[in-house]
């Protein structure tokens, strides 16, 4: 339609009647054809599209590589927290310590915590200095439930 309008053999109104389109649309298409006709022969437009597609492909390949590295690392996730903490590799070439902790579900403070250093710095916790230790409050708690005929108390 735009080519026929550009040729000028028929009026816009006649073309609109033939193709059942509003004359303003034909005028708009004709204007766009005139403005962009030179782009048909230019190679630049295709280069930009190819370059954008290549950038997208490179980004996707990078993401696939990252996900493969993380997937291999996540195979270590099916263990206890202390085992996951030991599985963190500070010298890993592609995953930072923070990212490894995030992937394994371990807080960074857990990774950096060293109990020997804490005991050396602050001393043994006071509860270990008592004779009964932790069991004392639990025994009192469980004795308070005996009149209610509970046999044991589970603390979760």
Image (cartoon, grey):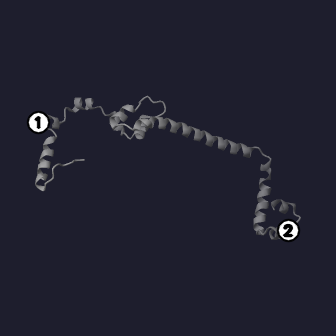
Q: Is residue 30 above or below residue 83?
A: below
Comparing 128 with 52, the one in front is 128
Residue 20 in percent (x, y) is at 78, 69
Q: Which residue is mark 2?
A: 11
Tag 1 residue: 131
Picture quadrant of residue 7: bottom right
Residue 111, disc: none
Q: Nearer the viewer, residue 114 or 33?
A: 114
Q: Quadrant of the image for the N terminus?
A: bottom right
**Residue in the image at 40% along x and 32% along y:** 88
Measured from the top left, where is residue 120 in percent x and y?
A: 23, 29
Which corner quadrant of the image does residue 24 belong to? bottom right
Labels 2, 1: front one: 1
Horizontal side of 14 relative to 101 (left or right) equals right
Q: Residue at x 67, y 41 (%)?
A: 51
Q: CA distance from mark 2 to mark 1?
A: 106 Å
> How far across and down, in percent of the image, does residue 141 sit?
14, 49
Q: Residues within 10 Å of mark 1 (few under 14, many from 20)?
A: few
Q: Earlier in the sequence, mark 2 or mark 1?
A: 2
């Amino acid at each position: 339609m735009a080519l026929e309008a550009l040729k000028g053999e028929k009026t816009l109104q006649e073309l609109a009647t033939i193709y059942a389109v509003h004359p303003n649309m034909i005028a708009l298409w004709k204007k766009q054809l005139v403005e962009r006709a030179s782009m048909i022969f230019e190679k630049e437009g295709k280069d930009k599209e190819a370059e954008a597609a290549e950038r997208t492909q490179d980004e996707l390949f990078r993401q696939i590589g990252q996900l493969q590295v993380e997937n291999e690392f996540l195979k270590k996730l099916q263990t206890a927290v202390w085992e996951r903490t030991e599985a963190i590799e500070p010298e890993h070439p592609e995953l930072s310590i923070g990212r490894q902790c995030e992937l394994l579900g371990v807080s960074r403070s857990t990774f950096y915590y060293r109990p020997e250093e804490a005991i050396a710095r602050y001393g043994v916790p006071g509860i270990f200095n008592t004779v009964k230790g932790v069991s004392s409050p639990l025994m009192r708690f469980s004795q308070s439930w005996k009149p209610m005929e509970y046999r044991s108390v589970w603390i979760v």
